[in-house]
Image (cartoon, rainbow, N blue to C red):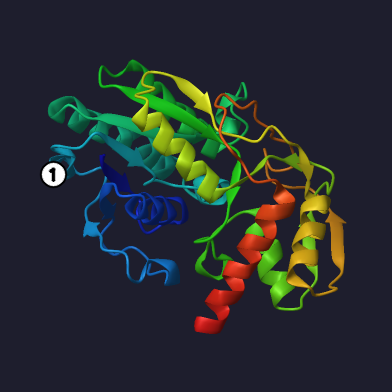
Amino acid sequence: MKLVVTGATGFLGSRTTSILRERGHEVVALARPGGAARAATEDLAVERADAGDPGTRRYLAGSDAVLHFAGVPDPARARSDPARAVRENAGATLNLLEGCLAHGAALVYPSTLRAAVDPPPDAYALSKRLGEETCQMHPAPATVVRLPSVFGPGQVAAEGATGAIASFAARALAGEPIVVEGDPERARDFLYVDDFVLALERIVRDARWNETLTVATGAATPLRRAAELVRDAAGNDVPIETRGGTLAPGENESYVGEPALGFPIRPLEEAVPLYVDWLRTLRVNG
């Protein structure tokens, strides 16, 4: 398949690009001009193009689908600039859909489980919901993929990556206490990134267009338990501090998905050590 990946220097975009290329697909990787450099993307050949620029549509010519990871990827950044989150997560999506319509391609729009909540709990979920609705109302073929908490290689807290497991692993490997803010028993559905990429490949291969799918494990893991698994994998007997406190809207809730696709997934007990080992390798080589 020939695929276009936007946001190709971010966590999900870079890992998706790498794995799909390894699996023999032709991948055109796009990243915004002036984007931040990341250790995991140093050898990743990318084209510099803004997903919201009409000129970027030309990259879709001859492609089967665009996997659209460009945008504002986390709640904190969306809270700080909600209007930008809407422009990036909905407006740039519309631009790419116009390109898909012109070039006979389809679009996969990675969204979030939070976007399924009514009303959306925060600006991030709202911007993603608007992106979903843009896909659903546009005539180009597009599928929304709602994601849980994805983690794994390519996700580095020191480079600005968000996510509980990334934060826990960075602290544990540094020999620092793992800190769980808010309710330590709130649950997340943690999905290993490599399993997610294979699910994306299947969606495009099977032409599952004009659907809203959930790619998730269905397993509810309390943050305290996730912290324990990270500590065990790191091999550092650091304390786990549960500080409680009030968090931003949407942050102190539990989010668990109902899987819509049957695909192989690694249990968290297997996936967390794989990620921690990757981080160790990055630290040694860095």
Count the marks: how many? 1
Estimate the x, y position of residue 202 in percent, counting from the top left: 42, 33
Q: In which quadrant of the rendered view does residue 261 lie?
A: top right
- The disc labelled 1 sits on which kind of residue? Gly
- 256 relative to 181, above or below: above
In this rendered view, identify the residue nearer to me: 165 or 250. 165
Estimate the x, y position of residue 157 in percent, counting from the top left: 58, 65
Q: Is residue 193 left or right of residue 68?
A: right
- 84 relative to 117, above or below: below
The residue at which mark 1 appears reads as 55
Task: Answer yes or no: is residue 101 visible.
Answer: yes
In this rendered view, identify the residue nearer to me: 198 or 30. 198
Dot 1: what SS? helix
Q: Is residue 140 left or right of residue 264?
A: left
Dot 1 crowding, Cα within 10 Å, few <14, some 14–19, many 20+: few
Identify which residue is drawn at 87% across, 69% down. Answer: 239
- 30 relative to 171, above or below: above
Identify which residue is drawn at 70% across, 54% down. Answer: 270
Identify which residue is drawn at 29% across, 19% down. Answer: 138
Identify which residue is drawn at 73% across, 47% down. Answer: 247
Q: Is residue 219 left or right of residue 184?
A: left
Task: Answer yes or no: is residue 286 visible.
Answer: no
In this rendered view, identify the residue nearer to me: 243 or 268. 268
- 5 relative to 14, above or below: above
Estimate the x, y position of residue 34 in percent, counting from the top left: 28, 64
Estimate the x, y position of residue 132 in percent, counting from the top left: 43, 26
Q: Quadrant of the N terminus?
A: top left
